[in-house]
Every structure is written in structure tokens, then in C-alpha cells.
């Protein structure tokens, strides 16, 4: 995870026991989520991280555009 210190808005895949997760770095904060989206099991390593109009940090999956709140994991919908 030391490579994330060099990338302020980076990401890194990590295996923790039987769990595959993604660690996202965004604006100096770290977030951890499951490695795949809940909808299609699409790898979130390629997801785009953005700040929404209401100031939430969200990720969008490239496959179908589904968005997730990165703090809570809640499915928001599509951008």
C-alpha cells in the first residue's frame, strides 16, 4: 500500500485472507471496498472516483455506469 502514498487519487488491489478488496486513495483519504461491484461482479479497480454535486465521494463502474457512495457502499444509481 505504500505505492498509494505516491498517487493521491490511486487504487490498489489487496487480498486479505479470503477477501479481495480495493484500497482507494482520494484527496488524502483511504477507502476500502469489495473488489467487485454488487450488480455484475465487475472489477472496481477500473472504477472512476469523483465527487458528486452533493459533495459525496462516489465511484462509477465503467461497465454499466452504476455509482456507489465510497464512504457507505450504498448503491446510488447511475450518473
Image (tube, helix red, strand yellow):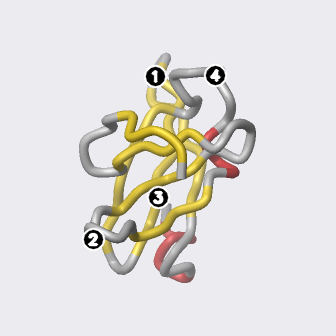
Q: Is residue 76 left or right of residue 6?
A: left
**Disc 4 to disc 1, C-alpha distance:** 19 Å
Q: Which residue is mark 2?
A: 55
**Disc 4 to disc 2, C-alpha distance:** 26 Å
Q: From this viewpoint, which residue is outermost toward the top?
A: 18
Structural crowding at the residue carrying mark 3, measured as other residues with C-alpha within 10 Å and reported as few (<14), some (14–19) or many (≥20): many
Does dot 1 land on a helix, a strand or a loop? loop
Circle nearer the N terminus (3, 2): 3
The quadrant holding residue 36 is top right
Give the mark toward the camera: 3 or 1. Answer: 3
Circle nearer the N terminus (4, 1): 1
**Disc 4 to disc 3, C-alpha distance:** 18 Å
Q: From this viewpoint, which residue is outermost toward the right?
A: 63
**Disc 3 to disc 1, C-alpha distance:** 19 Å
Residue drawn at (52%, 63%) of the image = 49
**Disc 3 to disc 2, C-alpha distance:** 17 Å
Residue drawn at (55%, 34%) of the image = 35
Q: Which residue is mark 3?
A: 24
Where is residue 15? Give x, y as percent.
Answer: 54, 33
Q: Nearer the viewer, residue 10 or 67?
A: 67
Give the mark toward the camera: 1 or 2. Answer: 2
Q: Which residue is mark 4?
A: 41
Does dot 4 land on a helix, a strand or a loop? loop
Amino acid at each position: 500500500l505504500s505505492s498509494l502514498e505516491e498517487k493521491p487519487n490511486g487504487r490498489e488491489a489487496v487480498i486479505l485472507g479470503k477477501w479481495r478488496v480495493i484500497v482507494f486513495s482520494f484527496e488524502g483519504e483511504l477507502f476500502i471496498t469489495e473488489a467487485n461491484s454488487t450488480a455484475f461482479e465487475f472489477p472496481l479497480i477500473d472504477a472512476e472516483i469523483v465527487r458528486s454535486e452533493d459533495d459525496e465521494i462516489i465511484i462509477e463502474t465503467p461497465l454499466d455506469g452504476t455509482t456507489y457512495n465510497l464512504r457507505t457502499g450504498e448503491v446510488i444509481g447511475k450518473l
